Amino acid sequence: MTMKHRIQQAVGSAREKAGLATGNRRLEASGRAQRRSAQLRSAASDVRHRATRAVREAQVRLRGGRPADPR
């Protein structure tokens, strides 16, 4: 999770709570959407990093322990 995603989650959560406290349903909904969007982007980023790591490890195993050529 990047710092950007954490900040977006925090801002979304704050907006959602402010909407709840004031009774502003539009603010609450936009905060919830912002928080969940940041969670989704964070999860996608984690999957991308794990897949990249798995591919690199598979390449190393296929080459008999030699690292891939840096490009």
Image: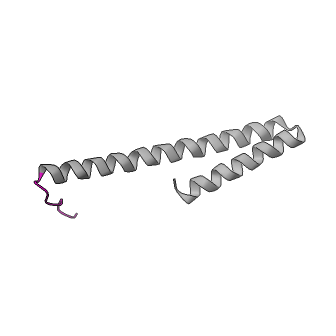
In this image, 64 relative to 56: left or right? left
- Give the magenta range: 63-71
Q: Position of residue 32 (x, y in %)?
A: 70, 39
Q: Quadrant of residue 7?
A: bottom right
Residue farthest along the bottom direction in this orientation = 70
Q: Residue at x 44, y 48 (%)?
A: 46
Look at the picture and state if 3 lies above or below 41: below
In this image, 21 relative to 16: left or right? right
Look at the picture and state if 38 lies above or below 70: above
In this image, 62 relative to 29: left or right? left
The quarter of the rendered structure image containing the C terminus is bottom left
Q: Residue at x 11, y 53 (%)?
A: 63
Q: Position of residue 47 (x, y in %)?
A: 41, 44
Whether 64 is among the magenta residues is yes
In this image, 54 relative to 59: left or right? right
Residue farthest along the left direction in this orientation = 64
Q: Residue at x 88, y 37 (%)?
A: 23
Whether 66 is among the magenta residues is yes
Look at the picture and state if 65 lies above or below 18: below
Secondary structure predominantly adopted by residues drawn in magenta: loop
Q: Position of residue 14 (x, y in %)?
A: 75, 49
Q: Quadrant of residue 29?
A: top right
Using the image as rendered, state which of residue 29 and residue 49 is in the foreground. 49
Using the image as rendered, state which of residue 13 and residue 27 is in the foreground. 13
Colouring scheme, one of rainbow, by chain, secondary structure, one colour: one colour
Q: Position of residue 45 (x, y in %)?
A: 46, 48
Residue farthest along the right direction in this orientation = 22
